Each structure stands twice: as structure tokens, then as C-alpha cells.
Amino acid sequence: MKKDFGKLFGVILLSAIVVLTTYLSLVTYGKKGKEEIKMINIFGNNLLSKEIYMRFADLDHSSVYNKINLNVIKKRIEEHPYVAKAEVKSDGRGNVDVKIKEKDIYAILLTKAEPFFVTSDFELLKIMEHTTYSDIPVISNFRLTEKPVPQKLYKTEDIIEAFKIIDAARITDTELAKRISEINLKNGGDVVLTFSGINYPVVFGRGSESKKMIYLSLVWDRINNLKAAYQNTEYIDLRFNNEAYIGSRENTGLI
């Protein structure tokens, strides 16, 4: 009887040791497996400050760091409408780097209600408070085929035409592209472009975007070299094949 009791006690003791060892292992693994976060650094941002992105993601207080992990940080940052992708890395010492890739803003769509950003994928984005940007052209007087809705695609014939003009400018001359301030689509009529630093419009028309942009670049080179001769320029008209009309208060020149 004593022998059986001894065996039973040994089995119980062994089981208790196994259970205790397993428990301690799991607790230790949990502590090691959970990333300790002390600081979160955001970079790659242009449209908004780091502080605003942190506030949006509810990461602006270090008191929440012990409740989150790298996946949570990535998910929260990527929920922002401006963010296309976020890469999150830890150095293993509590410092987390978040590299933001913002969406490619192609233009500002000017509507009667409010302006919207338009991305390279034709997605509309509400322009948020404290957003900073430059060298982004405005698209105006487009034909309204449907109501613009934030975070929805808006790929109409007029918007595609405007994008072709922007693409042609970017390929031809990056400085020329940066100076486009407005693409007036004239509700389906001939497109008129306005450039920053230039006090006259360019009647661009529709179609042959690349060809016209190359020609416009050449015309401006000539105007800049002969400023005195073209100081009274009132407009440039590119609607004609292989020709540009330069209108002035005195006469209309053809080059």
C-alpha cells in the first residue's frame, strides 16, 4: 500500500513539475515575444506633419505603447486617406521607425462645393486641415458627369485629358510641369492653361498633348531669348498643327 502511494505521489509531483514548467515557459515566451515600444519615429511624410499622423493613429501618447505591436501601428497609419503604404521596423531596443509612402497627388479638382486632391489612380481625397503642398495644378470647369465623393475613383473623360497634359509636361520639361497652375477644361471646350510666373494664358486645345508640350517648350525658349520682341504677348495658341500663334496687343505672330 505504501509502495502504491509512493508511486501515486511521484506521478502527481511529476505532473505538477511539468505543468509548472510549461506555464513558466509560456509566460517567458510571452514577455520575450511582445515588442517593447518606447519611441515611434515617422518619416517620409510631406502632406502632413508627423504629429498629425501620430494623432490620427492614436499614437501620440506613449501610455498606449504597451497595448500595441508593430502590426497595429502599420494598420493604423495605413488607415489615413493620404497614406498608400507604411513600412514599420523596430531596432529591437524599443525604437520603431515608420516609413510613410503618401499617395501621388496629381492635381486639385476644383468643384463648386469644395476642392479635392486627385491621385495618380484617379482617387479623390478630401484636403484636410493643416495640409501643405506646392506645384500641384488645379483642374477647373470640368464636365460634371457624377458627384465627386471622397476616397472614390473619379475617372472621367475630362480628368483623363487633364492627366495627359500633366504627363506630357512632366516628360517634356519638369520645370514646365511645376509651373502649371491651372488646367481649365472649359466644360468640354478648348483647354486653356495658366502657368505661374506667366501673365498670359496658353490655349492648348485637346489632343496631341506630347507634341504640343514639346512645341510650347521650344516657343518659350525663343520668347525668353527675345524678351523685348515678345514683351506684349497676350496669349499663345497651340491648336494648329506644327504652329504656334503668339497674340499681342500690337499684332498676332505665327512661329
Image: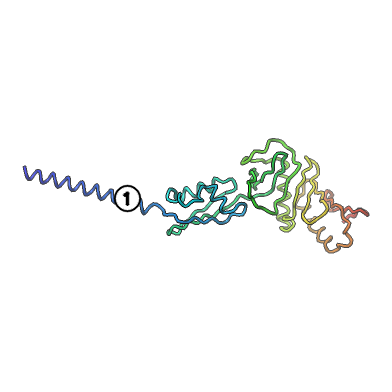
For badge 1, the amino acid type reads: Val
Observer-nearest of 187 and 110: 110
Does residue 56 appear left or right of residue 70 in this picture? right
Which residue, given by chain and number where applicable, does mark 1 sit on? 27
Q: Looking at the image, how many numbered discs can be counted on the residues?
A: 1
Observer-nearest of 65 and 231: 65
Taking the view exactly as shown, the residue that stands out farthest to the right is 250
Location of the N terminus by quadrant is: top left
Counting from the top left corner in percent of width and height, residue 4 is at 9, 43
Q: Please report the residue visible at 67 percent of the width from the left and 44 percent of the height from the top.
A: 116
Taking the view exactly as shown, the residue that stands out farthest to the left is 1
Q: Please report the residue visible at 27 percent of the width from the left and 49 percent of the height from the top.
A: 22
Q: Please report the residue visible at 81 percent of the width from the left and 44 percent of the height from the top.
A: 190
Does residue 64 appear left or right of residue 133 in this picture? left
Q: Report crowding for label 1: few under 14, some 14 to 19, many 20 or more residues within 10 A (C-alpha).
A: few
Counting from the top left corner in percent of width and height, residue 150 is at 63, 40
Counting from the top left corner in percent of width and height, residue 208 is at 77, 49
Colour pattern of the rendering: rainbow
Taking the view exactly as shown, the residue that stands out farthest to the top is 146
Does residue 139 appear left or right of residue 74 in this picture? right
Rendering quarter of residue 123: top right
Location of the C terminus by quadrant is: bottom right
**Relative to 108, residue 232 above or below:** below
Counting from the top left corner in percent of width and height, residue 70 is at 46, 51
Observer-nearest of 122 and 113: 113
Secondary structure beneath label 1: helix
Observer-nearest of 83 and 94: 94
